[in-house]
Amino acid sequence: MFDAVLENPYPDGPWAVEAPVPHALLGPVLGLLGTWRGRGHGEYPTLAEDFTYAQEVTFSHDGRPFLRYEARAWLLGADDKPLRPSARESGWWRLQPDGRVEALITQPTGIAEILVGHADGDTVDLATHEVARTPTAKEVDATRRRYTLADDTLTYVHDLAAVGQQLQHHLRAVLRRTA
Ligand code: HEM
């Protein structure tokens, strides 16, 4: 009786050139589609030490005017060996006319962010509209995320206002397209 639902007839497509055909509103973010891997560096005034991490980020779509976003990071030791899993997040980037973006991103640390911003093909700039926190989550008030795409390299900087600190640098990473 469940035969009709055994296979998902609407799989996501990470590619701009294969089915499903990307929705026209995805135009300003088409260059992001796919999987990216690379490394980053992070710091925050409340932390005793800065840190280096590796990260994998995937943007995919199902033909509708939003991206599915997945990111997972792991810390790297001095010898470049994986130390331990670190930040993960996933969400949806809703494209609006004129390249406006509304993003919903959740993290297993109890944070749910809504960000608004703009995409123009080479850059995406997102800033917090609202943050919701579970009762035990750390006090995160705002983030700003700026992505720059050039020659199959995706660079981002991530500012953070949290635990009583003003909005300031937390992360910078350079990712290369892997698929
Ligand atoms: C690539 C993504 C990220 C990495 C690798 C990363 C890494 C880290 C690390 C290593 C720490 C120190 C504590 C620990 O060892 O876990 C930390 C602290 C923290 N991070 Fe991140 N982070 C990332 C993304 C984020 C995001 C997206 C947010 C918020 C939306 C965030 C908010 C915080 C906060 C609030 C702290 C605690 C500061 C404190 O209590 O002093 N981080 N992060």
Image (tube, rainbow, N blue to C red):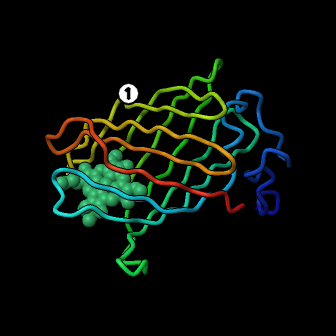
Name the amino acid type tagged 1.
His
The answer to which of 19 and 155 lies nearer the viewer is 155
One can see residue 66 in this view:
yes
The answer to whether 58 appears left or right of 7 in the picture is left
The residue under the point 66% across, 36% down is 29
Give the left or right position of residue 30, taking residue 135 as reference.
right
Q: Ligand 1 is found in which quarter of the picture? A: bottom left
Q: Quadrant of the N terminus?
A: bottom right
Q: Position of residue 57 (x, y in %)?
A: 56, 56
> Image point 23% across, 51% down: which residue?
44
**Which residue is labeled 1 in the image?**
129
**For the residue carrying disc 1, how many other residues have a C-alpha within 10 Å: few (<14), some (14-19), or many (20+)?**
some
Q: Find numbered disc 1 in the image and state the secondary structure of the residue it sits on.
A: strand
> Which residue shows up at 22% across the image and 43% down it?
162
Residue at 34%, 30% (x, y): give it.
130
Visible residue check, residue 110:
no
- Report the quarter where the C terminus lies: bottom right
Pick the front one: 92 or 51: 51
Task: Indicate the position of residue 76 as horizontal and vertical percent values.
Answer: 39, 73
- The extreme top residue here reads 98
Q: Position of residue 37 (x, y in %)?
A: 58, 62
Count how many numbered circles sit on residues in the image.
1
